[in-house]
Amino acid sequence: MVWVAIPIETVGKENIKTYIDSLLEKGLVTQSINAHLVAIRRFYTYLQDEEGAQLENPVHRGMALRVPSPLPRHLKDTDVTRFFQQAKTPRDKAIFMLMLRCGLRVDEVAHLTLGVIDYNRSQIIVRRGKGNKDRVVFISNDAASALAAYLRKRPITREQKIFLVEKGTYRGQPISVRGIQKRIEYYSKKAGLPVSCHQLRHTMATQLLNADADLVTIQDLLGHSRIRTTQRYCRVSNNKARRDYYKAMDNILKREARTSLANDG
């Protein structure tokens, strides 16, 4: 493939930008275009280091195209019901309810200890979450019931971590992150749904936003350090966008009607 029609010694960053434009016109995806740029950059590095060529690498850092971040995938209400119809064991139901209702990450669930549960205040203190930060999350009634049901059946042990392996060689030891992921993969297959731990967390955020929860509140509950991360959920929250649109439009039309009446008078 001929990617440039001039001697390689004369190629500059403007030629690279033109090349990028030509790849975009051909319909190449971002990842493929970036792979082309990496190949060209390495080719020039080879010429410089191995062949001793006195030329400048035309592919500068920062030229790579930004890979678009996918929208968070959330579950429909019917899919949530369908999934939990499969996750019937007290331990697994409690684990997944904490992700769905409290927005906990899988590693945060795996590291929960008995001492962080405050039933009187209906809250959980998440110790050393992402970014090594502590935060407080609240427990809904159904999540609290699921957790209590598991704790009643949990073996009596000195182990402080809440969720334990229930079978096999490691019985009685804390369940690992991978162990939780394998459980959700198992139930996902049984339900015939592509469900992941992170999807349950995404679903909580989307449901809260659709129920008119404040974006900053959701940021705090999820433990996002930047509001931009939380704002991604706005793009999938069509129900809230619809309500906000019609509410705002109704106010606009009423204001215009009042103005029109005042002018006529």
Image: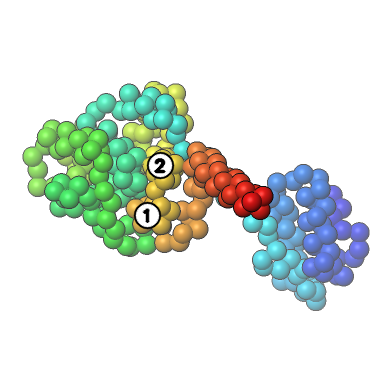
Q: Residue at x 24, y 28 (%)?
A: 89
Indicate the amino acid at tag 2: Ala
Left or right: residue 195 versus residue 252 is left
Which of discs 1 and 2 lies nearer the camera? The answer is 2
User: Which is more toward the observer, 28 or 117?
Assistant: 117
Indicate the amino acid at tag 1: Thr
Secondary structure found at label 2: loop
Q: Residue at x 36, y 26 (%)?
A: 81
Q: Residue at x 57, y 46 (%)?
A: 254
The reply to whether residue 5 is visible in this rendering is: yes
User: Which is more toward the observer, 263 or 32?
Assistant: 263
Q: Residues within 10 Å of mark 2 (few under 14, many from 20)?
A: few
The reply to whether residue 252 is visible in this rendering is: no
Q: CA distance from mark 1 to mark 2?
A: 12 Å
Q: Which residue is mark 2?
A: 211
Please state the horizontal and vertical placement of residue 232, each as a whole percent of the image: 51, 50
Please state the horizontal and vertical placement of residue 256, each as a whole percent of the image: 62, 49
